[in-house]
Structure formats: C-alpha cells, structure tokens
Amino acid sequence: MPVIGQRNYILPPTTDTFVSLANEEFTRKLDLTGFGNSWSKIKIGISCAIADTGGGNIANTQFFVGLSSGTAFPFGSISCVHAVGWMFGSAAATWTYNAGAGNPYYSAATFRYLRRVGVTETNGTVGSVTISVPTTAGSLQRRGFIEVMLAQAATTVAFNAYSEAAATAASDVSFEQFMYSTSQGIGGSGTPYVLEVQCVGGAAQSLTPGAGWNTNVLDTLDIYWSNPTYSLEIYAIATQFTS
C-alpha cells in the first residue's frame, strides 16, 4: 500500500510530506459539481521524484497520469470502468539514469496517450519526447515537475504533457515555483516555465474514441506507477479545469 513519509529540502517548505507509490495507484475524486463530463480542459500538475537506483536504469515501468471514472476500478484495474490520460514511456518503458553533475535524474524518451476500459486500450501513436524527473538522491534534495493537459471537444480528446527540462532537473522546484508553473497555460496558450526555463513536451496529440466515450463520468484524478522496487514520490498535486 502507499507509504507516507517526509523529506527535508533547502527551499521552502523545508520539511515536505510525500506519498510513495511502488506498483501502486493514487486516486482522488475531483469536485466537478455543475460540470460532470462537460468540462473543456483539465490540467494536472505533479511535484514528484523517483527513488534513486544508485546508478542504474529502471526498466519496464509505466507512469500514467490522467482521469478515471470513480475510485473503485481506476486505470490499473483489470476491471477499469474508464480512464483517459497520458502514459510517460511506452508499455515497457526504460527510465534512463543520468548522473546530472551530482544531482541525478531519470529521463524517458517516449509517450503515448490512451483511453482504457477494462483491459482494452485505445492508444495514440507512441511519440518522442525527453521527459526528465529527478531522483531522490544527490547533493541537493529535489522535487520535480510534471504536467498533463486534457481537452475535449465533441468526441475528440486532445492531450499534451510537459516536464522540466534537463537543464533544471538538477535543481529543486519548490512548492511555490510548482504552483506558479501549473497556473500557466490553462487557456491553452504557451508552454509553462519552471525556474525561468521553458519546459519540454511532446507535440499535442488527439484521440477520437467514438460516440459515448465519456458515458462514465471522468471525475477522479488517477496516477499509476508500475515499478515495485523503485518508487515514485509525490509531494504535491494541482488541478485546474475550465468549462
């Protein structure tokens, strides 16, 4: 089950609480009162890091961020009711270890966007983007930045995602900086900046699941990390949506 812990940082808050996932899933119901499935855009920002391996890559690991229908059967369940989101890395992704001048980080070179019902997935084409996430080790304790944008129009869902650039993966993204970055671009304009450096992201992609794709209300934040040995630590989550 998820583990709750604390870490100390140089930047405020200097003591931060986290939730650790190892082959686990975090779900939380969103307050979409008055919206239902009629929202236009939803953006999810995550402050996170990945457990340090001491120098090795992490193989066969999926990192899903998106929305699901309810908390009982989310993305990771074989009985998934409905989930839509962005998969960092392909189905069997390798997260590459980068020494990072004393503050190591991981990078994944692919993404795919998808819809899942049960074990059936409607996938977008695997694309190329270098996502960077800091490790939990190094001379500076760090929190990284991941952002996913979902937009719907009729039966089409558009996807985009960003992470901090490799140039900033060796730095700590404080809670204040994280909130500032996630507040950018909900209207769809521009790429967010972290630590005054432009984030990196894949080209916007779209998926046409067909009529009735959103019959089961997508009302739950859903984060899935599949590796049982090296955990994902989540320090903060921010969501924004527009009608």
Image: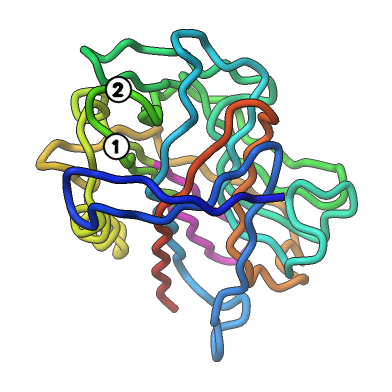
For disc 1, the marked residue is 142
Given contact means CB atoms under 8 Å apart, are the residues at marks 2 and 1 in contact?
yes
For disc 2, the marked residue is 138
Asked where in the image residue 222 lies, by quadrant, the reply is bottom right
Q: Nearer the viewer, residue 186 or 20?
A: 20
Tell me the amino acid under the disc marked 2. Answer: Gly
The percent position of residue 219, horizontal first and vertical second, equals 63, 72
Q: Residue at x 47, y 70 (%)?
A: 40
Q: Residue at x 42, y 37 (%)?
A: 49
Q: Residue at x 30, y 45 (%)?
A: 8
Q: Is residue 150 magenta?
A: yes
Please identify the quadrant where the C terminus is shown: bottom left
Q: Nearer the viewer, residue 124 or 146?
A: 146
Identify the magenta region.
Answer: 149-161
Tell me the amino acid under the disc marked 1. Answer: Arg
Q: Which mark is residue 184?
A: none
